[in-house]
Image: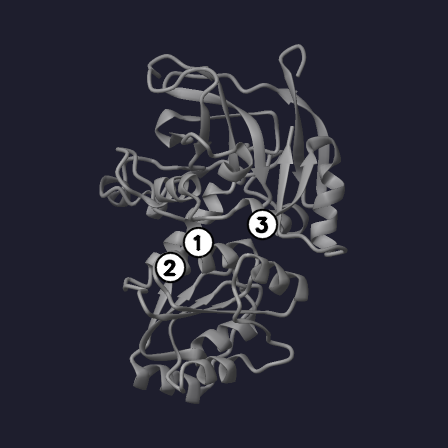
Amino acid sequence: MQNGLMEALVLHGVGDLRYEQMPIPSVSEGHVRVRIGYCGVCGSDIPRIFSKGTYSFPTVCGHEFAGTVDLCGAGVDEFKQGDNVVVFPLIWCGKCAACENGKYVQCSDYDYLGSRSDGAFAEFVVAPKENIIRIPEGVTLAEAAQTEPAAVALHAIRRAQESLVGKTVAIFGTGPIGLMVAQWAKTMGSTQVLLFDIIPEKLELAKRLGFEDVYNSTREDAINVVNTQTEGEGAHVCIEAAGVPQTYLYALGSVRRCGSVVLLGNPIGDVTLSASLISQLMRREVRILGTWNSDYSVSGNDDDWRTVLQAIASGKLDLSSLITHKVALTGSIEVLNMMKDKTEFYAKVLIHP
């Protein structure tokens, strides 16, 4: 940082990512400037950068981040310079019916740091004070930078709308969010968490996190495994966390009568359901639930974000073990290309200025 400029990764077009300087964002009334400690790379960032693009160019991506308060605008009394904070990246309009009911993720006219507005692949970000939460004592910035995906994972499993005590949960896809879902399921009392993936390193990471029922679905039929492990009944809750057509079929085919299937993964292609599978879902009276983002409370009530932070602080949620890469902004383009090309194993990648 020098002469009012900061370092940033700036996306000028699809695949045109540049490490360069840009002006440090100014701070208006009711807003806070945060100095970035770490910003996680979301699975959605890779297609956003390399194939789909953002809503306009140039844009700074990055929406999973934690940092310290650098400067408070007028009217901000809740925070002070040096506070460690996380930032809810969705900036709601405050005027639509969803906002009036506190359902900010359903806002009909929202902004979003890292896709619609500049995000945290940079030294600084500015956000409204309402979007900021102080990090509890004992939680590192690296852990806190994963609050957003951990809240997404929590929101997904809460969408099942049932107690998990003594229940079986099957998770298809063991990326960082899938492994976070698994940890939430165990914390919530599930006595059987079944994990499926096709990448051996991901399954090994799941084992290191303490999960024993992990299966490579290229070697074992996932639906048969679930049926075998549940005496033919199927799982109470199935979480599709990969976005791959085959894992949708696994999740839908593995759920028991009156069970729930939560669609969490961003789909990478169309999914075709056979008439027999649809008939099974109807006869079983299965609930199929969509999920997007996470619940956030502006008034400080219990929400997905605060639950995550407290779970990290109490040791119920292990996010440090998910981190495979910490890379400086200066070397991050190379790592982002590695993630795109999948030339080495990675779980959670954190970028820091």
Identify the residue shown where x is 41% and y is 81%.
230
Identify the residue shown where x is 48% and y is 18%.
82
Label disc, if present, on residue 322 of the rendered structure: 3
- In this rendering, the answer to whether 5 lies above or below 323 is above
Identify the residue under disc 1: 153
Marked residue nearer the N-terminal end (2 or 3):
2
- Residue 265, given in percent of the width and then of the height, sits at 50, 61
Identify the residue shown where x is 44% and y is 42%.
312
Identify the residue under disc 2: 157
Q: CA distance from mark 3 to mark 1?
A: 14 Å
Q: Which quadrant of the figure contains the N terminus?
A: top right
- Residue 97, given in percent of the width and then of the height, sits at 24, 44
Marked residue nearer the N-terminal end (3 or 1):
1
Q: Amino acid at mark 2?
A: Ile
Q: Residues within 10 Å of mark 2 (few under 14, many from 20)?
A: many
- In this rendering, the answer to whether 22 lies above or below 298 is above
